[in-house]
Amino acid sequence: MPARPRRAHLAITCLTTALTLTACGGSGGSDGGKADGTVPGPSALASAKGPVTVTLWHGLGGPAGQALQDEIDAFNKANSGKIVVKASFQGSYADAIAKYTSAVRGGGTPSVMVTNDITTGYLRDAGQTVSAQAMAAANPKDLDLGKLRPAARNYYTADGELLAVPLNTSMPMLYVNDKLLDEAKVDRSTLGTLAGVTAAARKIHAAADVKGLDQPFDGWWFEQLTAAAGVPYCTPDNGRKAGGATALSLTSGPQRAAIGAVAQLYTDGVALDTGTEGSAAVSAFVAGKTAMMFNSSGAIGGLNQAGMKDYTALPYPLSGSSSTAGPAIGGAAMWVDRPGHSAAEQVASWKLISYLASAPAQERFAKASGYAPINTDVNKSATWKTFLAENKPYAALNKQFDGTPATTATSGCLSGAMQGVRDAVVAEMQQAFSGKTSLDSALKAAQKAATKKIQDYREQAGQ
């Protein structure tokens, strides 16, 4: 697969802060393995003299970080004398990408970078990596990309090319307090749509001294409401085609209706503002202060840890057609770095990624971490079927993951400016959700401010 032209105009400048990404040019496009555009295959590793060392940086802490290390230990044991993987926790995702950007400028990037969803646009533009699609084509006996779940594969694809392999994937979900819903006589069959959820929230609040809904107030949720409405978050085509995203789209009719329906719950006192942290929303839900909650699938672990039993996890509700609309994924993916890394090291890195994305490794990782497995062959596992039968919230997540259509809307916005976009949107939308300004004014202001972030990024990147 040919390499993209060298982005000589992308100066290796910087991450001005951990929250604002600036594209940094490497020595070619994301799909080139060498200066001539070739990508290394099995012979590069076979001809290596002595064990090949692979370094991996990640931002996974807690159970997920330990689960990742367990799998790396197993890989090292299986490849003793051939490949040695040294994994290093770099702090939060923001800390990890900041350190990576610094390493791009000064040298010493890792062989494999595990970084979160919204850094995808930045890593594509940085030109430091070999695409997953190119590595898979050059190493056909390793990972079968067709085994990756469509919704996950779709997120990390741009212009028809898979850039990275997802490792840990989360999705938004609706959590309901069974007792409170039963007391209010809420029909669960109505909760598949946003209209049904908002009506239920009002019914519950009217029937009892409890709020109907809470959710973390971060930028991810405006992206989710947009994807679930079946429309792109940025234009053109959610930034997925040549040329990339040029503006944010936040004022379309479907978006206005979906965001407005949730905003009205807050201004009417039906929903509870718990701030930006997902854990705060979980705490309020566990305490019975709210009957329903929008939160990441990662909240399952927190609910279980808190000992909450009488709750049900349901799919994230849609306001658009189920054929085009659905939730967008979160989580992180694995990237093969190129400059400064030998052909043998790149192939060894791909071997590691292929192992971590395999069905057995993904099943173990999912059970230990709470993330959804990204390999469809996991669904064939008898032990996974037993696990789902015993863990209903995970079964709901698994079903939602399988049923999410791979469309432009559900792919999410691909832009190197995404963190700045999220910050701009949240600042404006807080004003509307608190009733300090009208929804339409806030949507227009958010769209304008976020578009400026995208345009500034493009100018700095020479796009």
Image: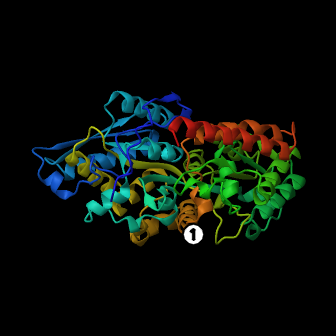
Asked whether, in this view, residue 93 is left or right of residue 408, the answer is left
Provide residue 337's location: percent of width, then percent of height: 33, 44
**Residue at the spot x=56%, y=32% of the render?**
19
Task: In this rendered view, identify the residue nearer to me: 461 or 42.
Answer: 461
Q: Quadrant of the N terminus?
A: bottom left
Task: Check the image and report above or below for 140 versus 430.
Answer: below
Task: In this rendered view, identify the residue nearer to me: 291 or 135.
Answer: 135
Provide residue 34's location: percent of width, then percent of height: 27, 48
Provide residue 171's location: percent of width, then percent of height: 57, 55
Task: Check the image and report above or below for 168 versus 102.
Answer: below
Residue 178 image-quadrant placement: bottom right
Could you tell me which secondary element the residue under label 1 belongs to? Answer: helix
Provide residue 242's location: percent of width, then percent of height: 51, 55
Task: Check the image and report above or below for 349 versus 387.
Answer: above
Query: Mark 1 Cα within 10 Å, few/some/many (few <14, many 20+)?
Result: some
Q: In the rendered image, is residue 342 in sight?
A: yes
**Residue at the spot x=37%, y=56% of the render?**
132
Q: Amino acid at mark 1?
A: Gly
Residue that numbered label 1 is attached to? 403
Asked whether, in this view, residue 218 is left or right of residue 142, the answer is right
Asked whether, in this view, residue 79 is left or right of residue 296, the answer is left
Q: In the rendered image, is residue 280 in sight?
A: no
Task: In this rendered view, identify the residue nearer to me: 153 or 71.
Answer: 153
* Count of residue discs: 1
